Amino acid sequence: MKKITIAKGDGIGPEIMDATLSILMHAGAQIEFDEISVGEKVYLSGNSSGISKEAWDIIRRNKIFLKAPITTPQGGGYKSLNVSTRKFLGLYANIRPCVSLHPFVETKHPKMDIVIFRENEEDLYAGIEHQQTDEVVQCLKLITRPGCEKIIRYAFEYARHYGRKKVTCFTKDNIMKQTDGLFHQVFNEIAVEYPDIINEHWIIDIGAAKVADTPEAFDVIVTPNLYGDVLSDIAAQIAGSVGLAGSSNIGEECAMFEAIHGSAPDIAGKNIANPSGLLQGAILMLLHIGQASVAERIQNAWLKTIEEGIHTFDIYNEATSKKRVGTKEFAEAVIANLGQKPSLLSPVSYSNNVQLSLPKYQRKAQKRKELQGVDLFVHWGGDNGEKLAAILKNLNTSDMQLKMITNRGIKVYPDGFPETFCTDHWRCRFEQIGGVKINNEHIVQLLRDAHDKSIDVIKTENLYTFDGQPAFSLGQGQ
Ligand code: NAD
């Protein structure tokens, strides 16, 4: 018997959770649950995170969390519970299977069967943002080696254990050579360990277009957080309905399972919501906790119910539906079909299911890091890189000199184009000269000199080589 935590959430949450639990218990799931209260009521009671400390303790004790959707109240100050749950519990992998159920659920892609692995904790979602000048705000894109290794290894392990043939990596490393470049590089490193699985890389823009057009060309996809967020909604939608998909959020210790849709306040309390998304989340949970035969029974009974044309209103259509049912009646139909298999849709078999146990991340040996220079980011209201360079050259020393200025990444000094539009945010690169070894003291001195000359430095970035390899981007046009 496995103890899990459940939260019934808001809107349609309680209805779809009751329907889901009733199917799970009838199918013989070996689970007990602690119920916690999260979401709207907790937010409106004055708790801006939507969850109490006691509820966190229960989630952390049970480690497995089945969560119905919640409503984040409108207005500032309320923190998204979904985002904080993922980050606090280290749920690094968001996994979303997107399968079409043609011809019973309308789709242009009858053969679609893909699983998207979205990195879940970092990228632009680290939420580190600053306004730096009158005209410029910045959001920091953080990509880490542990983050890349964990999600990419998970995707390959999943592919191997679930008999998938191919893993595709999506990045934009033709532009972001350091951040997306690291994700792609780690993908290549790990792919070598799985010679039985085909691997490929696509640039995200054309790759996403290809998914929307020809999803049957893909199998398992692994991608950083933002691309995965967008792509997984597109994939769920073109598979037939966002309302039918579940997802898992997996960490080294804990895991959370949910539907991908929201709390649908417009249809709450009417017994019409489709419980399938949360049920799919619960099936992923059963597989994760090693109750594969129960998961298989439920999935086959669910497929049979869909195939019989017993549909909730959201997927009901004259051509293939036979009976329009409410939330409870749909759950009862699935329960009545337990033990049966679909005859037109492919039945599932989870008999080879194993609980994936991934190694914990092992920190690598440190590389030799050498300081090469510094980028000073300067707030300056002028419009011409050459003029700013004339001011900044006064900071040159025998150790470090101004090498380049860019504006929004485009080189404007030396040899800038007068046509280039410039904002009030300038990256001014100082590099060591003549093989001098520099250290942070040189940078502190440079900042002191800049301050004395009334140059408004709003941020610095050190320029390093790691094991002799430059680890910073060049200016566009450099
Ligand atoms: P939504 O997914 O709740 O609803 C979008 C549309 O889909 C609505 O017309 C709704 O009636 C319909 N729909 C959704 N689920 C359905 C189901 N199971 N059966 C039938 N129809 C269904 O998205 P929204 O309206 O943008 O958001 C509503 C609330 O949900 C917001 O407060 C939002 O913050 C929250 N939300 C929560 C989660 C989560 O908890 N994981 C995810 C997304 C949105």
Image: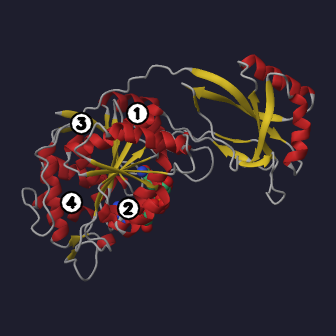
In terms of secondary structure, where does tag 1 sit? helix
Query: Is 379 left, or right, of 408 in this rendering?
Result: right
**Total marks in image:** 4
Q: Residue at x 21, y 60 (%)?
A: 331
Residue highlighted by disc 4: 331
Pointer 4 residue Cβ closer than 8 Å to ligand 1:
no
In terms of secondary structure, where does tag 3 sit? loop
The answer to whether the residues at label 4 and label 2 have Cβ atoms under 8 Å apart is no
The answer to whether the residues at label 1 and label 4 have Cβ atoms under 8 Å apart is no
Three-letter code, disc 2: Ala
Residue 378: percent from the left, percent from the top? 81, 38
Q: Nearer the viewer, residue 101 or 12?
A: 101
| Gap between marks 4 and 3 measured at Cα | 30 Å
Three-letter code, disc 1: Ala
- Which sits earlier in the primary sequence, circle 1 or circle 2? 1
Of marks 1 and 2, the one in the foreground: 2
- Which sits earlier in the primary sequence, circle 4 or circle 3? 4
Q: Can you say which quadrant of the picture contains the N terminus?
A: top left
Of marks 4 and 3, the one in the foreground: 3
Residue highlighted by disc 2: 235
View quadrant of ligand 1 = bottom left
Crowding around mark 3 (Cα neighbors within 10 Å: few <14, some 14 to 19, many 20+) is some
Of marks 3 and 1, the one in the foreground: 3
- Which sits earlier in the primary sequence, circle 2 or circle 3? 2
Residue highlighted by disc 1: 55
Pointer 3 residue Cβ closer than 8 Å to ligand 1:
no
Crowding around mark 4 (Cα neighbors within 10 Å: few <14, some 14 to 19, many 20+) is many
| Gap between marks 1 and 2 measured at Cα | 33 Å
Crowding around mark 2 (Cα neighbors within 10 Å: few <14, some 14 to 19, many 20+) is many
